[in-house]
Image (cartoon, rainbow, N blue to C red):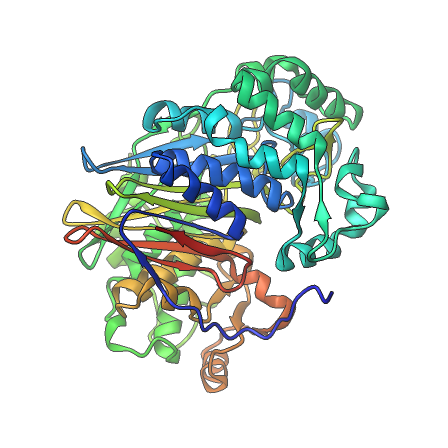
């Protein structure tokens, strides 16, 4: 069977329902979340069930060996809370340790880039604060499919096939190479080691992951590859609940998790762009894209300077989100020409692979949830016998002494994964996200503009061709997706943007999202699912 076609022309319709809705990039995962809603669970319960299923369905992108973040809207209190389920560097890993190896930057495929996996504790803490069910309740579908088998989805199968050489070099990855080959689209795959691990978590809670045989397998497998993680590093791990950060964009309040995540980047870009009348410009006009891209470049300059673990470094969030600061930054944008040289961070007053899912229940509670291993299949190490791929989030640290994001023991690195939430007049308006490394804040910026400035429905917003400032570098090339007018690309090139058209395989650069819009007056949910992935909206 052919893995997939890269002819992209979405004809998906928006899905509407009232009793519950889940959006995920795999249909079986979305349906697992919907099963929880139909069984009386709420948005938090459904999010964890869907997340666990995505671990099985797309193990290259996420897993219990990775991290998670969530935003949760409580329909009774009208409050948004932010869960940071990301892990920290091992206590024994210091800047001197890696600099003695001659490193100028973190090596993404070395065991030193593995931080403590935070996802399992994050699941538990989300359920404990906002859920109504237990891990045993919500992990059943994931356990079943991991043990009994599931058909490999087309986009996932294609990406898996492209990772074949990497998988054959990976440590302890035999479970993911049936008969020594990568699974093809439609091929049934069983993951007995992962099923055993999920079963242990369901029965023993997070302690079954952070202590005991699973923890021992993680530590042993990492130390065999030169890592320094210990059982004590795993045992001491904890999630944190943070005050979400937000900004107002033309009457819609957009929420993100605070740093160490990069959601701040999207909010800075929205603030800068609000100084221009984007609504009056066609979405694919050179002028509008130019203004949005330059707003994004300015946001990236600040992101790389300021985003870090807020418990270990001073991050001036209020100053960065000031409307006056945004206006001053917007004034730097030339109406025609692109930045040359690339923009630098602003002067303030003194003082990669991922899954995203969204769930809204019939009561109007919403969970925007994201989980990742970072690069495909993480660091390339599976904890022996567990089916657990280990993340390489530590590659997000800086090795520049004195930088806010510089590597230090027990510190969280700069994180790319970000869930999004939006309220209007204090009521839930949208639960949304766009996964995909440094594309994520750029995707948030573009879909919010589509929803607010152009009043598109969620599916239309996701169908629209996207652009991407390469790797989040302020002076990076501008990747433009197939479907954007050639005349627009030519005009942007004249303005000084280094245009790189992307079609076919290049579509993977533009992320994969889910959006659920909520009408507080009627209780109707309107959902859209990413046409660049395998997923769907499941609703009832």
In the image, residue 480 above or below residue 451: below
* Residue at the (57%, 28%) spot, across then down: 117
Horizontal and vertical percent position of residue 131: 35, 28
Q: Nearer the viewer, residue 484 or 432?
A: 432
- Left or right: residue 389 compared with residue 337: right
Front position in the image: 236 or 159? 159
Q: Examine the rendering and report whether any part of residue 349 can be seen.
A: no
Residue 38 is drawn in which quadrant? top left
Q: Quadrant of the N terminus?
A: bottom right
State the image quarter where residue 482 is shown: bottom right
Query: Image point 48% across, 72% down: which residue?
Result: 10
Placement of 200 over or under 55, stated as above or below: above
Residue 118 or 107: which is nearer the viewer? 118
The residue at the point 24 percent across, 40 percent down is 363
Q: Furthest residue to the bottom?
A: 487
Q: Position of residue 137 (x, y in %)?
A: 46, 27
């Amino acid at each position: 069977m052919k893995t997939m076609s890269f002819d992209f022309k979405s004809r998906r319709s928006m899905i509407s329902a009232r009793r519950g809705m889940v959006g995920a990039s795999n249909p079986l995962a979305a349906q697992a979340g919907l099963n929880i809603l139909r069984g009386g669970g709420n948005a938090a319960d459904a999010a964890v069930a869907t997340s666990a299923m995505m671990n099985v369905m797309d193990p290259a992108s996420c897993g219990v060996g990775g991290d998670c973040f969530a935003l949760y809207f409580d329909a009774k209190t009208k409050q948004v809370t932010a869960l940071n389920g990301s892990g920290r560097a091992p206590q024994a890993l210091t800047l001197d340790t890696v600099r003695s190896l001659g490193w100028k930057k973190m090596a993404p495929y070395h065991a030193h880039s593995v931080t403590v996996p935070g996802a399992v504790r994050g699941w538990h803490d989300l359920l404990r604060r906002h859920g109504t069910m237990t891990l045993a309740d919500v992990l059943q579908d994931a356990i079943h499919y991991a043990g009994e088998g599931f058909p490999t989805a087309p986009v996932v199968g294609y990406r898996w096939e492209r990772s074949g050489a990497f998988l054959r070099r990976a440590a302890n990855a035999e479970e993911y190479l049936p008969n020594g080959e990568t699974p093809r689209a439609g091929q049934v795959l069983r993951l007995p080691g992962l099923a055993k691990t999920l079963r242990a978590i369901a029965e023993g809670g997070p302690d079954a992951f952070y202590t005991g045989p699973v923890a021992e397998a993680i530590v042993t497998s990492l130390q065999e590859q030169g890592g320094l993680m210990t059982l004590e590093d795993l045992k001491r791990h904890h999630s944190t609940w943070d005050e979400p950060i937000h900004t107002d964009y033309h009457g819609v309040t957009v929420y993100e998790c605070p740093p160490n995540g990069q959601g701040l980047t999207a909010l800075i870009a929205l603030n800068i762009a609000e100084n221009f009348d984007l609504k009056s410009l066609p979405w694919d006009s050179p002028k509008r894209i130019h203004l949005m891209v330059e707003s994004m470049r300015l946001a990236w300059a600040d992101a790389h300077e300021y985003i870090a673990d807020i418990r270990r470094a001073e991050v001036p969030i209020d100053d960065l989100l000031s409307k006056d600061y945004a206006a001053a930054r917007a004034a730097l944008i030339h109406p025609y020409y692109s930045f040359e040289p690339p923009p630098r961070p602003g002067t303030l007053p003194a003082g990669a692979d991922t899954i995203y899912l969204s769930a809204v229940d019939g009561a109007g509670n919403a969970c925007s949830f994201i989980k990742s291993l970072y690069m495909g299949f993480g660091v390339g190490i599976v904890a022996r016998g567990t089916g657990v791929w280990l993340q390489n989030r530590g590659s997000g640290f800086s090795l520049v002494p004195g930088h806010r994001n510089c590597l230090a023991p027990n510190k969280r690195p700069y994180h790319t994964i970000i869930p999004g939430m939006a309220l209007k007049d204090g009521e839930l308006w949208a639960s949304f996200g766009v996964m995909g490394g440094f594309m994520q804040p750029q995707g948030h910026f573009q879909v919010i503009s589509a929803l607010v400035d152009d009043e598109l429905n969620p599916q239309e917003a996701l169908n629209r061709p996207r652009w991407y400032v390469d790797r989040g570098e302020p002076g990076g090339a501008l990747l433009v997706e197939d479907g954007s007018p050639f005349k627009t690309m030519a005009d942007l090139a004249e303005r000084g943007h280094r245009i790189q058209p992307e079609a076919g395989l290049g579509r993977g650069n533009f992320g994969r999202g889910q959006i659920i819009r909520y009408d507080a007056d009627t209780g109707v949910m309107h959902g859209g699912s990413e046409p660049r992935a395998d997923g769907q909206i499941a609703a009832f």
